[in-house]
Amino acid sequence: MKLKITAIGNSAGVILPKELLARLRVGKGDELYALETPDGIKLTSYDPTLAKQMEVAEQVMRKRRSLLRKLAQ
């Protein structure tokens, strides 16, 4: 689905079509979580539990970067 970035005040944003909002099961005022993947950005409905888990995982990955590199070999 091709989306266009538009000006919203002093910022930029993307208007999500109602079909996409329905697939994400979100509506006006809901929050989304943007997850960076090897294939691009994935949008999901915001889940506070997942957000906390991702925050902890990112902290561990930063702290144990060299260990994770060795395990990846």
Image: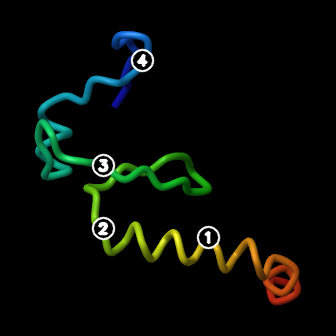
The amino acid at mark 1 is Glu
The amino acid at mark 3 is Leu
* Disc 2 + disc 1, Cβ < 8 Å: no
Taking depth in this image into account, of 40 and 29 the one nearest to the observer is 29
Report, in whole angstroms, how far the alpha carbon at label 2 lies from the one at label 3.
Answer: 10 Å
- Mark 2 or 3, closer to the camera: 2
- Mark 1 or 4, closer to the camera: 1
Judge from the rendering whether residue 37 lies leftward or rightward of residue 22; answer left or right.
Answer: right
- Mark 2 or 4, closer to the camera: 2
Report, in whole angstroms, how far the alpha carbon at label 2 lies from the one at label 1.
Answer: 15 Å
- Badge 2: few (under 14), some or many (20 or more) residues near its Cα, within 10 Å? few
Where on the picture, by quarter, is residue 9? top left
Which residue is denoted by mark 4 in the rendering? 5
* Disc 3 + disc 1, Cβ < 8 Å: no
Q: Residue at x 34, y 13 (%)?
A: 8
The amino acid at mark 2 is Pro
* Element assignment for label 3: strand
Which residue is denoted by mark 3 in the rendering? 32
Which residue is denoted by mark 2 in the rendering? 48
* Disc 2 + disc 3, Cβ < 8 Å: no
How far across and how far down the image is residue 40, in percent? 55, 46
Q: Is residue 46 above or below residue 52?
A: above
